[in-house]
Image: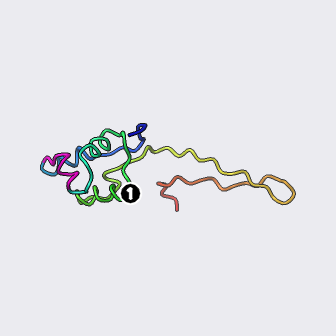
Amino acid sequence: MGKPTRVTNSIRALRFGHGEMTQAELADHIGVTRQTIIAIEQGRYSPSLEVAFRIAQVFGVPLDDVFGYPDTYDWTPPTRHDKRGNRLACPAPTHPKSKER
């Protein structure tokens, strides 16, 4: 199914917290194969947004309670120049989870 993903998930814990739901039962609920659930749980496959939302709906939790992404923010602002070629200061990027808004 491809290279490992950096997306993490809590599907296994959620399944066990919901009456020890099997991978096959979850797969049936959301319309995918058991092998897809296995690959997602093991971090070998990132589901589509639609499948991710369906998984969250089955457990009755927000999407970010099911899936996570490493808290790194490797963004470098572009270099901008004015008409004379002078470098312009770009505003510092804010982290997506920053409380300063």
> Residue 7's spot in the image, x, y percent?
40, 44
Picture mark count: 1
Q: Give, as a three-letter code, the residue at label 1.
A: Leu
Q: Taken as a whole, is the magenta stretch helix, strand or loop?
A: helix
> Residue 85's spot in the image, x, y percent?
85, 54
Image colouring: rainbow
Furthest toward the bottom, the residue is 101
> Residue 31's spot in the image, x, y percent?
25, 56
Membership of 23 in magenta stretch:
yes
* Quarter of the image that includes the N terminus: top left
Is 72 placed left or right of 35 in the picture? right
State the residue at coordinates (31%, 53%). 65
Q: From the viewer's perspective, is residue 87 above or below residue 101?
A: above
State the residue at coordinates (47%, 54%). 97
State the residue at coordinates (16%, 46%). 22
Is 32 placed left or right of 70 in the picture? left
Rendered image quadrant of residue 61: bottom left
Depth check: 32 or 66 in front?
Answer: 32
Membership of 91 in magenta stretch:
no
Q: Which residue is mark 1?
A: 49
Furthest toward the left, the residue is 19
Is 59 placed left or right of 2 in the picture? left
Q: Which residues fall within the magenta stretch?
A: 20-28
> Residue 36's spot in the image, x, y percent?
29, 45
SS label for mark 1: helix
